[in-house]
Image (cartoon, helix red, strand yellow):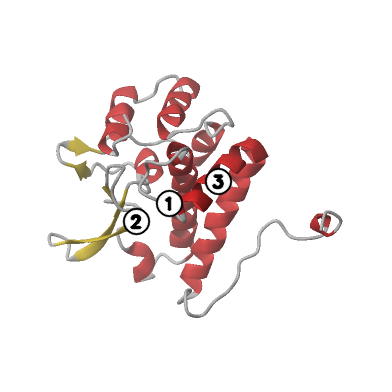
Amino acid sequence: MNIFQWFLPDIIINFNRNSIENSNDLYETVFHELAHASHFNKVGAGFWDNYINYIVNEGSYGDGNGKDANLVALSETWGFHIGWYLSRAKYPSNPIVTLTEEENFVPDKKGGIDVGWVWDSLTFSYQRTGWIPRGLIHDLIDTEVDNVRDTFYDKAGTFTHQEIFNALDKDVRSPQQFRDRLMSETSNRDRTDVISLFEAYYFN
């Protein structure tokens, strides 16, 4: 096996008609996994071993209380955002993409569900929810002001994907550490609103 691993691909996307309904689903899955690959390439195997151990021990994303849950929250936030962002760019008119997957994401505290849907009676649509802060990177990049939860509003914005990726260093192992690295690398731009946004996602 050690000999063959040099010839095997790093990522295998197993197409299953029962789990992937259309081109958008496949596109999002591929770029979600490629986002993980880009993160792995930057942080190395030691970081990723902790990620894998968490997923194996919890059987999935779990409820956020396991060892290295914050590391998984950060890694999955990057993966979910890139998958959603690039599939939305590719298929902007696809209703599956334009549903509120990242925009108007409903944050949940650790100890809650890993990922699910809630019905929004104001917009008459389902919205994503869960303890992994799926909408966080989108809220850091977009320029829209929207209510995240309770009295918290997304007033942060205008950060670039390059700035986000630059802050995903191997010693950055939680959303809070990512926030602090992003601030230090962007001269504390929009610091008050950024801190408030992370608090809105229960990572303060």
The quarter of the picture where the C terminus appears is top left
Left or right: 143 as drawn, with respect to 83: left
First in sequence, mark 1 or 3: give its number: 3
> Which element type, helix, strand or loop, lies under badge 3?
helix
The quarter of the picture where the N terminus appears is bottom right
Q: Percent from the top left, x then y, of residue 6?
A: 82, 54
- Whether pointer 1 and pointer 3 mark residues with C-beta atoms closer than 8 Å, the reply is no
Left or right: 155 as drawn, with respect to 75: left
Q: How many marks?
A: 3
Instruction: Give the labeled residue for mark 2.
Output: 115
The answer to whether 11 is drawn above or below residue 142 in the figure is: below
Left or right: 61 as drawn, with respect to 40: left
Q: Percent from the top left, x then y, of residue 38?
A: 61, 46
Q: Residue at x 50, y 43 (%)?
A: 75
Q: Residues within 10 Å of mark 3 (few under 14, many from 20)?
A: few
Q: Nearer the viewer, mark 2 or mark 1?
A: 1
Left or right: 122 as drawn, with respect to 37: left
> Which element type, helix, strand or loop, lies under badge 1?
loop
Instruction: Give the labeled residue for mark 3.
Output: 53
Q: Residue at x 20, y 43 (%)?
A: 147
Q: CA distance from mark 2 to mark 3?
A: 19 Å
Q: Residue at x 45, y 27 (%)?
A: 177
Q: Residues within 10 Å of mark 2 (few under 14, many from 20)?
A: some
Q: Residue furthest right?
A: 3
First in sequence, mark 2 or 3: give its number: 3
First in sequence, mark 2 or 1: give its number: 1
Instruction: Give the labeled residue for mark 1.
Output: 61
> Which element type, helix, strand or loop, lies under badge 2?
loop
